[in-house]
Each structure stands twice: as structure tokens, then as C-alpha cells.
Amino acid sequence: MPFPQDRPRRLRKTETMRGMMRETHLDVQDLVYPLFLKHGHDVKDPVQSMPGVYQLSIDALVREGSALQALGIPAVLLFGLPGYKDAQASSSFDPDEVVPRGIAALKEKCPDLLVITDVCLCAYTLDGHCGIVKDGEIANDQPLELLAQAAISHARAGADIIAPSDMMDGRVGFLRDSLDSNGFEGVAILSYAVKYASAFYGPFRDAAASAPSFGDRRTHQMDPANLREALKEVRADIDEGADMVMVKPALSYLDVIRAIREAVLCPVVAYNVSGEYSMVKAAVQRGWLDEKAAVLEKLLSMKRAGADFILTYHAKDVARWLSS
Ligand code: PBG
């Protein structure tokens, strides 16, 4: 018997051979681009901790939408920086606020671009918490009505998909019922079902001005140590009517994506979060990493783990690289 009998290198000889053997592919259709909306005209304010990411006014958002469509990116995820914040998060469901107005403007100019909206109270409350704080604790049930009003205001403006990110118990079922009873049974729910209390959201909280003024999010977001609990969260959300489930962050949780992919039938979504973006960007700025190679490898790993699509701040660069 000649040594060695198996020579895996036979199938890696040329790029053509490697291309035929490739098991996983990254496609522009897999990408969702997150965007931050603020008041004003012709505003494009850079986010310091996220090079290449901007806070945009609605007119700038609409221009961005056309550019994204030209690149073949199918969807955006919208976050709002409201004009005011109060104890009841009133601006989260104000139809004159940036998110509902942004959705309507985008839908008018780019009707085929799918619009996903983040539904949470943290950018709209004075204390930056995802719910309403009562006796020093984040209440669970009281914010549901507010979240439902926010979701309905987004649906009314034309959102295709609502993405609750607050991690309150029972909110998917509550939102599904509220959407349905308001005539929005066609609006899908992408649940942030498995959202860990992660250090990797730091730069985002700059971008969305949503850092908590005291305490943290560990009483509602998940403990990074837990996998079985992730499966429990996913099953509960699917039972309550979630159409898709998300794992967030992605890079440190590829095992969680894989386990969920094997456990459910619905689309599984990965959120390549702000900290994961900024660490690559920082290393690239110092000349320590090859940006294109590092980003493509990172996103491919999320697909290989089982994600159907990926929310990523790298989406525009990736779309350009994939088409060149
Ligand atoms: C809102 C929300 C957060 C992110 C998405 N939606 C922040 C948080 O939970 O503190 C993080 C996204 C990112 O880091 O890119 N609750």
C-alpha cells in the first residue's frame, strides 16, 4: 500500500478545483446592512468607534438605500436616534420620529429593499434600559405594550420585518397578537431570540446613544456560558410565532448557531455585532490584518456554522468584493 493512501491535497491543487469542492458560499443575498437614523438634513455623522459607519438623516438614508440596491444588498436593519427621550419611551412609537418616517421614505424610493426594524426601548428611555425600571428592576410586562406600539408604528410605515431585541419574556407572542389584531398579519418577526449579555455591543451603544446610565443588561440578556438555555429561548419564540431566530453576537457563539441550526426548521440569523466589526477595523487600520481576507473568512464561518443570513456593518464592502 503506497503511503499515504489518502491525499486530501489532490482536491486543493488549483483554484478551479478548490472552487468545485467548496462546501459553503457567501453571497450578497446573505447580507443585511444596519443603519442609524437621526434628525436633520444632509447629515452623515461618523461613529468614532466604528470606522466607516455613520448616523444618517432621512434624506441621506434614502440615498444610501439606492446605493445598497445597486450593490445587490437585499435588506437593511434600522435603528433610531430619536429627537427626545422620556421615562415612558414615548418617542419609540411616535409616528413622526425618525424610524417610521425613514421607513416610509425608503419604501417610497426603494420599494424592493426589505426593511427590518429593531424594536427595543433602550434608545428611547432616559436611563438607556430596554424596559421600564420599577423599584430598581427592569419590569417585564409593562414594556410589552410600548414595544407593541413601536412595532405597529413601524408596520404602519411599511416595515417588512420587525426585530424585537429587548429580551423581555413573552414579547414575541405579545407582538404577534398586536400586529395581527391591527391588520399586520403579513409583517414577519425576526426574534433576537438568543441575545447574550455581551461586551461586544460597546461601539453600538455609541452609535445608537443607548448605553444604560446605571446597571447592566444581565437580568434580561443571556449568560454567555449557556447553550441549553439558548435552545429553550429559540423554542419559546418559535412557539410564540417568531418567523426567524437570531443569535447575537455571532463570532464567539458559532457553536450556538450550529446547535440551533440543527434544532429548528426556520431561518437562523447571525448578528455580526459592532465590537466584532470594530476589532477587525482597528487591526486593519494598524496594518495588522488584511481586511478583505479577514472579513470574508469571518462571515463565511458564520454561514458554515449554519446561519442563513448575516447582519453586518461590513455588508457594503463585502458586496463590492464579491462582485469584483
Ligand atoms: C438594542 C440593541 C443592541 C444591539 C442591537 N440592538 C444593544 C444592546 O442590547 O445593548 C447591539 C448591536 C451591535 O452591537 O452591533 N437593544
Image: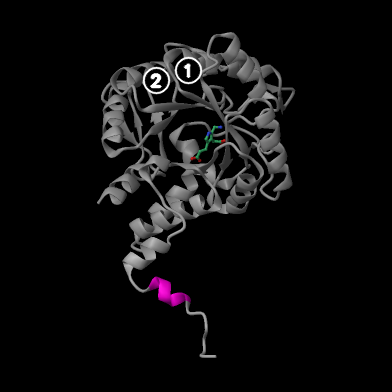
Is residue 10 a member of the stretch shown in magenta? yes
| Sequence-first disc among 2 and 1 | 2
**Magenta residues (range):** 8-12
Is residue 236 toward the left or the right of residue 59 in the image? right
Relative image position of residue 162 (x, y in whole percent):
52, 24
Q: Amino acid at mark 2?
A: Ile
Residue 244 seen in this snapshot: yes
Q: Which residue is mark 2?
A: 103
Is residue 45 toward the left or the right of residue 163 in the image? left
Residue 154 badge: 1
Is residue 4 a member of the stretch shown in magenta? no
Towards the viewer: 305 or 123: 305
Q: Residue at x 73, y 46 (%)?
A: 228
Neighbour tally class for label 2: few under 14, some 14-19, many 20 plus, Cα within 10 Å: many
Q: Main secondary structure of the magenta part?
A: helix
Is 71 above or below relative to 88? below
Q: Residue at x 45, y 51 (%)?
A: 299
Towards the viewer: 25 or 1: 1
Confirm or reject: label 2 Cβ below 8 Å from ligand 1. Answer: no
Q: Residue at x 36, y 43 (%)?
A: 28
Relative image position of residue 303 (x, y in whole percent):
49, 50
**Quadrant in which residue 233 is drawn:** top right
Outermost residue toward the top in this view: 182
Marks 2 & 1, CB-CB < 8 Å contact: yes
Helix or strand or loop: what does disc 1 sit on? helix
Towards the viewer: 210 or 269: 269
Q: Quadrant of the N terminus?
A: bottom right
Is residue 19 toward the left or the right of residue 87 in the image? left
Residue 197 badge: none
